[in-house]
Image (cartoon, rainbow, N blue to C red):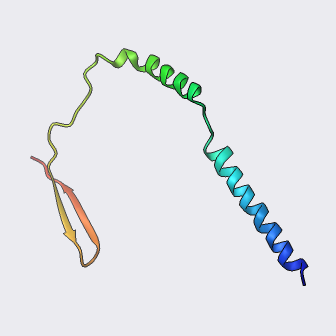
Amino acid sequence: MVKLPMLIAVFAWVVFGSFLYYNSKVLNTFTTSKENEKLQADYEKSYKRFESIPQPRVIAVNYQIDLFPVERRFEVKSISG
């Protein structure tokens, strides 16, 4: 009788530990502040040449939004002008 609850507890512990390891070591790798600073410096060196080039920007946007609260939806249409 005691074996089944213990087996379930060990299994849950292993699954939870695996989940924590995967999320903290595989998906979200940890970087130190020195590594972050180096990444930032490399980024700035890579894109420094584009600093003086004019960048595209949005001047005007024309659109129409229809809200349908009863149906819990909306429609967005661009309007040529």
Horizontal and vertical percent position of residue 49: 37, 15
Is 43 placed left or right of 80 in the picture? right
Q: Is residue 33 left or right of residue 15?
A: left
7 to 20, vertically: above or below: below
From this viewpoint, which residue is outermost toward the left?
81
- Whole-percent x and y of residue 13? 77, 64
Seen from the viewer's position, the closer of residues 43 and 56 is 43
Q: Residue at x 47, y 23 (%)?
A: 43
As drawn, 6 above or below 64: below
- Quarter holding the N terminus? bottom right
Side of 60 relative to 43 (left or right): left
The answer to which image quadrant residue 2 occupies is bottom right
Q: Is residue 66 above or below residue 2?
A: above
Residue 54 location, quadrant: top left
Residue found 24% across the figure and 79% down from its top: 70
Q: How many marks?
A: 0
The picture places residue 75, in percent across and down from the top left corner, at 24, 64
Does 10 appear above or below 4? above
User: How far across and how far down the image is residue 44, in percent?
Assistant: 44, 20
| Residue at the image position 14 percent from the left and 41 percent from the top | 60
* Foreground residue among 60 and 14: 14
Q: Is residue 69 left or right of residue 50?
A: left
Q: Quadrant of residue 5?
A: bottom right
Identity of the residue drawn at 56% across and 29% down: 33
